[in-house]
Amino acid sequence: MKGNYGIRIGVILSVMIIAVSAYAAAKSAQSAPSTPAKPGQTCVECHTGLSPGLVSDWKASKHAEKGVGCETCHGADHNSAADADKAGVAGTETCNQCHENQVKQFNGGKHALAWKCVVNMPNFPHLSRVFVEGGKGCGGCHAFGSKDEKETAALKSAGTRSQGASCGVCHTRHTFSRTEALAPQSCQTCHQGDDHPQWLMYSGSKHGVRSALKQVGVLPKDACAPTCQSCHMPKGDHAVKTAWGFFGIKFPLSKDPVWAADQTTILQAMGLLDMKGAPTPAMEGAKALDLFRFTEDDWQKERDKMIKTCAECHSTRFVKEELRKGDDLLREADKLMAEGIREVAGLYKDGIVKKLEGQPEAFPNIFTFHEGPNPAEEKLFVMFLDHRPLMFMGAYHNNPEYPIWYGYSKMKADLYEIKKEAAELRKKP
């Protein structure tokens, strides 16, 4: 009995000691300064236990070396688990405090318009929010770039606040490493797959193979081995652009009347030209999104920039000839693309396929994406955003496999399927 009493007294004393210790700790925390004495000190002490990976990345960064603490990017309003939502998310405006020139270049390039492009696509209303704001599809890459307050709020409500940090897409948080961003693999996450296959083309090209061999030490450090950044970000220029752009269109159209007619058909299927060949209101949106080079001078400026870059390793004559070959394959791809569009357009003209609701013309729309009204138009979408780029981009990336097998061969198969489906639709009563 006495033994039990002693045990109970011991337990009570232990509980009291724990309670007093907890109270003292709470009072100490309340009296602790809300702003760290040294950059990142309080944040580091807490997050070393909560998210040690982030802390180790920051410690390895130039920011830590230069004394740039957590509050510089995240603000000083977050001091405990109770107010974690007050931690700001660093975007380009945050980076602009120290990296003004790079942010200015970035804002003048196509990456800054990635988010604007995806939310202005005609299929956007049909997509699950998980694909877009949730970042498990288009938004996983296209959340890159400038956003207004409403769009940022949509991302935040979907739990993708971190995707507001555009610079952190390539200079990943929290190291923000220049070395990492200069590696070609940093482009791989977004530039792969069916509609953005640049990594696959590059990595299998002689340029990509030499770069990989250089990274593992097979080639010496001073060997010529171009990376994505070598060609598309010469001298660190963050304004990434190309002459032909993603869609392989420029204005004015080609002086070759056949090619110009084919590209006119493609632009009509994009909803940017009407049936008379005049610009639609959507063309102004295309200009705002910088989808094409809209003057010959703008196109030539980007072409000359690429020639100058390539001439660091090759003769100017060789470079111009190789780029001309790419132009030739783009013309051939447009010929196949236009033939497919005209086949489906005939179904509209003959009343076999009815105009979609909200569609200004009785004409196929290659931006219906996965919502195509029939298999023929679904195949047009795949032909345009998958196989056509493989044909001409494969040539520009100097990969011999892609233009023929994944481009030309697939486009020919697409055209066969479109004609077959069109014939079936014509048979139906």
Image (cartoon, helix red, strand yellow):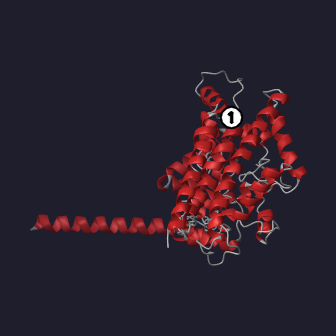
Image quarter of residue 283:
bottom right
211 versus 137 height, above or below: above
Nearer to the camera, 8 or 423: 423
Image quarter of residue 356:
bottom right
Q: Which residue is located at x 28 percent, y 67 percent?
A: 13
Q: Which residue is located at x 82 percent, y 34 percent?
A: 320
Three-letter amino acid code at disc 1?
Asn
Q: Is residue 279 visible?
A: yes
Q: Position of residue 232 (x, y in %)?
A: 75, 42
**Disc 1: CA contacts within 10 A as few (<14), some (14-19) or many (>=20):** many
Q: Position of residue 213 (x, y in %)?
A: 60, 26
Task: Report the side of 47 relative to 65 (left or right).
Answer: left
Q: Position of residue 319 (x, y in %)?
A: 80, 32
Nearer to the camera, 126 or 118: 126
280 versus 243 height, above or below: below
Image quarter of residue 21:
bottom left
Q: Quadrant of the N terminus?
A: bottom left
The residue where tag 1 is placed is: 398
